[in-house]
Amino acid sequence: MLPTTIEAITAILKADATVTPNERVTMIALLKEHGRTGQTGNTVALLERRILRRVDVARILACSTRAVDYMASQGILRKVVLPGRKRSRGFVSVEVDRLLDGVQKKGV
């Protein structure tokens, strides 16, 4: 696929408010690897382990940033602290997805 095509698709996905940044990155990665065997699963696995900012987690879970902080203090979400740092960097996207899946299953 031509780089200009990928840039155009990226611009379209950025304009669509219903597509989250995680989904956009995953879709673009899959498009870039089209036709290559055995690599797509690795890319998706790596993309699933992204670090999300507190604001992004709040938007994904449809709650406030204070609610995200409360979930972290209760141990529902685990903060990611990089080596040599005192403050957290964010939250692992896989844990946020699991939390979201659990909430959706209980609500159904």
Image: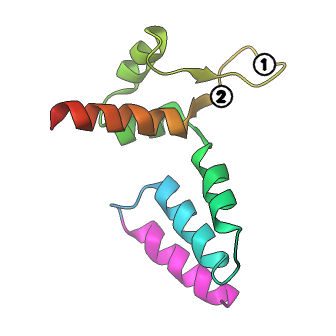
Tell me: residue 92, above or below residue 73.
below
| Disc 1 residue type (three-letter) | Arg
Q: Residue tagged by mark 2? A: 89
Q: In the image shown, does 7 or 102 lie closer to the viewer?
A: 102
Q: Is residue 79 left or right of residue 16?
A: right
**What residue occupies the far right of the structure in this picture?**
84
Query: Is label 2 in contact with label 1 (beta carbons under 8 Å)?
Result: yes
> In x, y percent, where is residue 89?
65, 28
- Is 81 one of the magenta-colored residues? no
Q: Nearer the viewer, residue 28 or 105?
A: 105
Q: Which residue is at 34% across, 38% downward?
A: 101
Part of the protein shown in magenta? 1-16
From what the image shows, is residue 15 above or below residue 87?
below
Question: How far, Cα to Cα, is label 2 from label 1?
Answer: 9 Å
Q: Residues within 10 Å of mark 1 (few under 14, many from 20)?
A: few
> Dot 1 lies on which element?
loop
Tag 1 residue: 85
